[in-house]
Amino acid sequence: MDMRLTTLDEDGWELDDGEPIAAAHPDTFWIPPREERDALAPGQQVKLIFRILVADEDGSEEVHVERMWVIVTGREGSLYTGELDNQPYCTDEMAPGMPLCFEARHVIHIFREGQDES
């Protein structure tokens, strides 16, 4: 697996950093504490914000934003590895099981058994 973060220009999708969003909207956008996001273990499910470049029927491109679940598979330095656990609505180019890299700053939710999955 290529151990790097993706970019819109090179890969057609990238991840949003949840920290500045949470800082700008503290009453409506909550993320888990940094200590929890720094201590993820393989098998945990986390939610990330994906920005996906999609070509419209007229050939123009537009960025779609989707929040999707990822299963943590490992870690190397500050980069986590994971596999997409959702099928994006806006494209078939990405699918469950797709490998990806992310950092703690990208995590906006950590799934906990018995908790709301929103």
Image: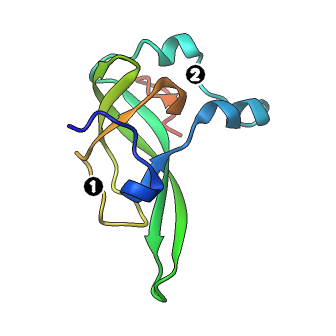
Distance from disc 1 to disc 2, alpha carbons, whole Å, reads: 26 Å
Q: Which residue is drawn at the image coordinates 67% and 29% (left, top)?
A: 30
Q: Which residue is drawn at the image coordinates 33% and 56% (left, top)?
A: 87
Above or below 92: residue 14: above
Mark 1 is surrounded, within 10 Å at the Cα level, by few (under 14), some (14 to 19) or many (20 or more) other residues, namely some
**Image coordinates for residue 115, horizontal then vertical, percent:** 49, 27
Above or below 10: residue 91: below
What kind of residue is marked 2?
Pro
Quadrant of the snapshot with the N terminus? top left
Q: Which residue is drawn at the image coordinates 47% and 80% (left, top)?
A: 56
Q: Helix, strand, or loop for circle 2?
A: loop
Q: Helix, strand, or loop for circle 1?
A: loop
Above or below 13: residue 60: below
What kind of residue is marked 1?
Ala
Instruction: Farthest residue to the front: give it.
Output: 10
**Image coordinates for residue 88, horizontal then vertical, percent:** 39, 58
Mark positioned earlier in the residue sequence (1 or 2): 2
Task: Residue 90: name its quadrant.
Answer: bottom left
Viewer-closest of 13 and 28: 13
Viewer-closest of 62 and 35: 62
Q: Mark 2 points at which residue?
A: 32
Above or below 56: residue 1: above
Q: Name the residue under label 1.
A: 95
Q: Which residue is drawn at the image coordinates 30% and 30% (left, top)?
A: 81
Query: Image check: 32 left or right of 80?
Result: right
Q: Can residue 39 be seen in this view?
A: yes
Instruction: Farthest residue to the bottom: give it.
Output: 58
Residue 78: which disc? none
Viewer-closest of 71 and 58: 58
**Image coordinates for residue 77, horizontal then vertical, percent:** 35, 16
**Image coordinates for residue 65, horizontal then vertical, percent:** 54, 56
Query: Image check: 17 left or right of 87?
Result: right
